[in-house]
Image (cartoon, helix red, strand yellow):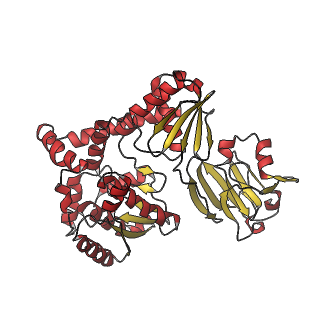
Amino acid sequence: MLESIEKFIQKTNMISAGDVIGVGFSGGSDSMALLHYLANNMQKLDIEVVAIHIDHGIRENSYIDADFAKEKAKELGIRFYKFRVDAPKIAKEKNVSIETAARDARYGVFKTLLKKGVVDKIALAHHMQDQAETILMHIFRGSGVAGAKGMEPIRDNVYIRPMLTTSKEEILQYLDENNLDYREDETNVDITYNRNFVRNVIMKNVLTRWPNAIKSIASFGQAVSEDDEYINKNIYDDAIIIEGDEVKIPTSYFLYDRPIITRILFKAFKSIGITKDIERKHFDMILDLAQNLENGKKVSLPFNATAVKEYYYISITNKNKEEMVLNEPFKCGEFDVEGFGKVITKRVKDFEPKDGVLFLDYRKVPKTAIWRFRKDGDVFEKFGGGTKKLKSYLIDKKIPLRQRNLLPVLADGNEVYAIAGVEISEKARVDNVPTAYMIEVKK
């Protein structure tokens, strides 16, 4: 049994009861161990597990891997989804490496499955050795603290890595103990790929001198992550304005020490959907723009993004950003909204007022109501009476624009019955009823 997986899942709370977990399943040793472990612990974790196999179109005999993966999923009694993408073609069209093209195509498939509600989360089989290699690769490319942290256990609230603290030795032992066979991709030894070069050349030599290097590098990444998290919690950045695909940072923020500026920029990039390929040189360019260049000057950034100096702000625009979509049914349970927090709905008998908690009579809310973001034409009947346009109500409550755009609202048509973390409509008032719904927001 892989105790490290069980402990890590409990520590990070990466899996919730009722989750449908899609496992990225290549048929290799790592994904075989993860799929088998989760599939055999479905009842204990109260989840459903499905296998997702993606043929990247790189090898002629890749269909053999697909058939193998399908058979293994059948043996485990779980659903199997197979997709084929053309990574070489994508690489040529976008002028990127095959590694990057394959990754982008893979995550495109995952994103589609998540959006369609086929799965709630995607489990990836990255382990401790992968983490150490990733940290080194990021450092080699010129990344700062963000890269030195390595991969996150949970990303965007939907991508999870249950084996991130599990060693390769533990995985192979688990496969042996459970008599599990697997298929290894022959391209894993091709050192023209960056990760293979790090694994088969650099790490191979490092481990002959420092046998505990993998664990040490991974521990370093964890320490960096903890320090970074602490500093981020103590940064004042309330004056940043987020509007759709654009984020505006006051030029006064660029008077801070560089470690603070860097973290503010990372937050700003993340808010407009840029989470990779931002390096120290890009921070240098933006810092120079803010401190030395005149109004109207701009610099080009990865992903077709640009930074422009506009009087008292540096405006960063991501033209490729996908608009965030929220469409959650109104029921007991929970869901996450990036940049806002977790919305939890429970049926309760105790209606004692609490900070940040709302109570409403679910019987007064139409069954067709959903959680979504606000839109033009929304109206809201204030608690105690008086109908207003939702936009006007939120302005009266002095809620900043960047927060208004992330507020989940419970609505049917243009009628809003609740604003998460803010207020419920008079139309959903709790009267003399034995039970009601409690809506809580956790940041």
As rendered, which of 59 and 351 lies closer to the eye?
A: 59
Judge by depth and name the residue closer to the eye, 295 or 188. 295
Residue 108 in percent (x, y) is at 43, 60
Left or right of residue 94, residue 206 in this image: left
Q: Is residue 45 visible?
A: yes
Q: Which residue appears farthest toward the left when viewing the image?
A: 208
Q: Is residue 37 above or below residue 357?
A: below
Q: Is residue 378 left or right of residue 286?
A: right
Task: Tell me where residue 390 appears, x and y as whole percent.
Answer: 78, 52
Residue 109, image x and y in percent? 42, 64
- In screen coordinates, is 365 left or right of 22? right
**Residue 186 drawn at (x, y percent):** 18, 62
Query: What residue is shown at x 68% (from left), y 57% (from top)?
Result: 438
Does residue 126 sit above or below 51 in this rendering?
above
Q: Quadrant of the N terminus?
A: bottom left
Residue 124: image quadrant is: bottom left
